[in-house]
Amino acid sequence: MAKTQLGARVDDEIAELAKARAKDRGLPLGEYIAALVREDADGLRQRGLDAARRFLDEHQSVFDEADEADEADEAEDADRRVAGAHAA
């Protein structure tokens, strides 16, 4: 397949982020950018975001319950530390 060289100006932060993400995926930068364009054109990113939103909408109560349980545990731990400090 023929290849065309493109040039784009981006902030340094974006350039470093793109290089790091390409490395994380084990891709050369050009292939990583091409994959992003393909995903965008195919709508994969939006479909993934939509699926994540639906998942959270359906299961948010489970996450809320877990957060409440963690907060209760943390409060109990803090109460024990305070009681232990008074005993000393």
Image (tube, helix red, strand yellow):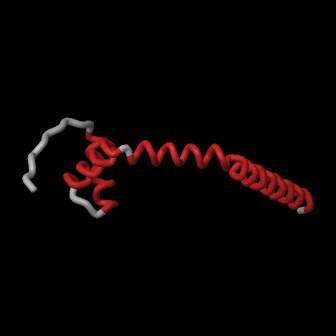
Horizontal relation, residue 65 to residue 46: left or right: right
Identify the residue shown where x is 9% and y is 46%: 4
Pinpoint residue 22: horizontal percent, then vertical percent. 29, 56
Pinpoint residue 56: horizontal percent, then vertical percent. 61, 46
When the figure is inspected, residue 6 is found, relative to residue 87, above or below; the finding is above
Pinpoint residue 29: horizontal percent, then vertical percent. 22, 53
How many badges with numbers are in the image?
0
Identify the residue shown where x is 32% and y is 61%: 25
Identify the residue shown where x is 69% and y is 51%: 63
Locate residue 79: give its quadrant: bottom right
Identify the residue shown where x is 37% and y is 43%: 43
Horizontal relation, residue 57 to residue 51: left or right: right
Q: Choose between 17 and 30: the one closer to the eye.
A: 30
Q: Quadrant of the N terminus?
A: bottom left
Residue farthest toward the front in the current orientation of the protein:
42
Locate residue 85: give its quadrant: bottom right
Pinpoint residue 35: horizontal percent, then vertical percent. 27, 52
Q: Choose between 54 and 85: the one closer to the eye.
A: 54
Q: Quadrant of the C terminus?
A: bottom right
Horizontal relation, residue 86 to residue 47: left or right: right
